[in-house]
Image (cartoon, rainbow, N blue to C red):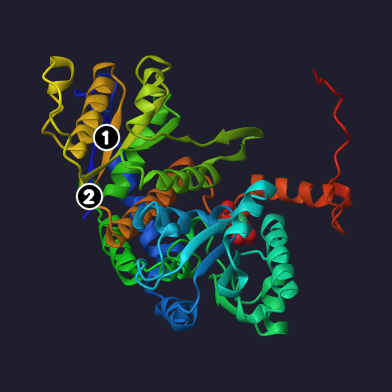
């Protein structure tokens, strides 16, 4: 199981950290919110227990494994979870391995950003004859996704390939353009439960289908999430990692620490920080009115990579404004390790010889953690015993549950994203979509140098 070390969130390890008194005051509130969420069973919990969702993915296994390439077409919550899974669970050279070296599973590509250089280079790499395109959009109306969908569809048609043999949609079960096209043209379509928001959807077909295509054990993923959920509903806050995480971040926010850095000491887990960044930014950054005043809520999530960002960000974290908490992500056992040979006797280098790279990496983490504590900067640690599907399933669930708790603490709705929708609508208007003319904004007065 994942473990969580909160030692450096608290006094006396960190001066200005959370005191016993502050923590005992918030405990009844946390217990109440945990009870509320376990009663409400939000959509991200329900998906774990909906066997049909996993079965629908499994039903496609045989067909999908005939292909060589799997291309996810989606953006934000429709792709970040799958990207985090692929980066964590497959080697960096996965797409360069032969199919037999990949155990019969598919290469994976992501058409997320509509950067023409990037999209063109992905399309250069894949032969549409051997490619399955998974178009993922809950709303079925996101411009980036629909642009890419039309591009790949054009490509299939030019090559004389039948689109319904190369495309799977993952979308709302009833509504939206993709569902209509699927019904009209008999394109296979998986369901995203209607109440499930994109950034909470990694454990639904949105994440499960790409994961299955690259050979991730999706049952272990869900089992991990279920086991984590059992801990998330524990009423004793000290035994509930989600409640602890939410309470600690909330109490530090009250002390002015409104930035939350996630810093994995693992390249494989770095994309998890992207997933987390979206989860907290889109879920918690909200405005609302209170007694006629606008209130702007949220914690700013930042990602950093250990040890690389020790040589970039950590100076700021140690001596810059005291406005952050840092969450280190530690890996106890790496799949592979490398012994550093003893080459020179000079004292500046000889201490490294005979040690493992993982040993250096983890001691760098502990060194940074302690340097922060020395400067009275709070941090916590998420500990992965190893990197596998079961542990990742837990990570997703702990963070989704923590986000739901944060929503209650901050008194906002973590499941909507009006700020994102507004940008989408203005884009529709600028791209001359019918019905969105009114969104056009007057040209700003120019200050271009
Ligand atoms: O979390 C969210 O709701 C968003 O990030 C969406 O996933 C993203 O905007 C893509 O939306 P859609 O899946 O409707 O294309």
According to the picture, the residue beneath numbered tag 2 turns out to be 336
Within the image, what quadrant is residue 345 found in? Answer: top left
- Whether residue 140 is situated above or below residue 59 in the rendered picture: above
Tell me the mark number nearer the camera, choosing from 2 and 1. Answer: 2
How far from the left and from the top, in percent, is residue 376?
28, 19
- Whether residue 151 is situated above or below residue 427 in the rendered picture: below
In the picture, the disc for residue 23 is 1
Along the horizontal axis of the image, is 367 left or right of 87?
Answer: left
Q: At x 47% / y 64%, what residue is drawn?
A: 107
For label 2, being within 8 Å of ligand 1 is answered no
398 or 33: nearer the viewer: 398
91 or 51: nearer the viewer: 91
Mark 2: give few (<14), some (14-19) or many (20+) Cα within 10 Å: few
- Evaluate whether residue 20 shows in this view: no
* C-alpha distance separating marks 2 and 1: 40 Å
Q: At x 58% / y 34%, what residue is drawn?
A: 296
- Whether residue 275 is situated above or below residue 196 in the rendered picture: above
Mark 1: give few (<14), some (14-19) or many (20+) Cα within 10 Å: some
Along the horizontal axis of the image, is 430 left or right of 233?
Answer: right
């Amino acid at each position: 199981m994942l473990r969580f070390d909160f030692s450096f969130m608290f006094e006396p390890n960190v001066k200005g950290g959370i005191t016993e008194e502050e923590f005992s005051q918030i405990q009844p509130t946390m217990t109440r919110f945990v009870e509320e969420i376990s009663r409400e069973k939000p959509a991200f919990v329900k998906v774990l227990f909906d066997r049909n969702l996993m079965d629908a993915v499994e039903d496609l296994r045989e067909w999908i494994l005939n292909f060589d390439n799997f291309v996810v077409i989606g953006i934000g919550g429709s792709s970040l979870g799958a990207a985090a899974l692929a980066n964590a669970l497959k080697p960096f050279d996965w797409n360069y391995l032969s199919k037999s070296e990949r155990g019969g599973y598919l290469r994976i590509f992501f058409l997320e950003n509509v950067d023409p250089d990037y999209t063109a280079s992905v399309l250069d790499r894949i032969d549409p004859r051997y490619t399955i395109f998974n178009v993922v959009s809950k709303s079925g109306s996101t411009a980036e996704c629909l642009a890419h969908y039309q591009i790949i569809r054009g490509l299939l048609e030019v090559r004389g390939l039948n689109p319904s043999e190369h495309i799977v949609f993952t979308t709302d079960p009833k509504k939206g353009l993709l569902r209509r096209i699927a019904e009209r043209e008999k394109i296979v379509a998986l369901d995203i439960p209607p109440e499930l928001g994109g950034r909470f959807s990694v454990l639904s077909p949105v994440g499960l289908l790409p994961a299955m295509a690259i050979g991730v054990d999706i049952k272990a993923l869900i089992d991990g999430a279920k086991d984590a959920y059992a801990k998330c509903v524990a009423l004793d806050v000290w035994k509930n990692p989600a409640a602890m995480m939410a309470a600690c971040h909330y109490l530090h926010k009250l002390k002015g620490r409104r930035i939350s850095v996630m810093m994995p000491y693992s390249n494989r887990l770095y994309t998890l920080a992207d997933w987390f960044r979206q989860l907290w930014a889109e879920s918690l950054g909200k405005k609302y009115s209170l007694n006629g005043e606008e209130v702007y809520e949220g914690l700013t999530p930042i990602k950093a990579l250990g040890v690389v960002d020790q040589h970039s960000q950590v100076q700021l974290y140690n001596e810059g404004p005291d406005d952050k908490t840092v969450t280190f992500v530690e890996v106890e056992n790496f799949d592979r390790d490398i012994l550093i040979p003893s080459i020179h006797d000079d004292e500046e280098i000889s201490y490294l010889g005979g040690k493992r790279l993982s040993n250096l990496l983890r001691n760098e983490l502990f060194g940074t953690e302690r340097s922060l504590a020395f400067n009275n900067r709070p941090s916590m640690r998420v500990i992965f015993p190893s990197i596998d599907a079961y542990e990742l399933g837990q990570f997703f669930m702990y963070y989704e549950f923590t986000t739901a708790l944060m929503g209650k603490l901050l008194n906002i709705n973590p499941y909507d994203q009006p700020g994102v929708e507004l940008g989408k609508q203005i884009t529709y208007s600028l791209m001359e979509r019918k019905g969105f003319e009114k969104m056009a904004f007057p040209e700003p007065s120019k200050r271009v140098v």
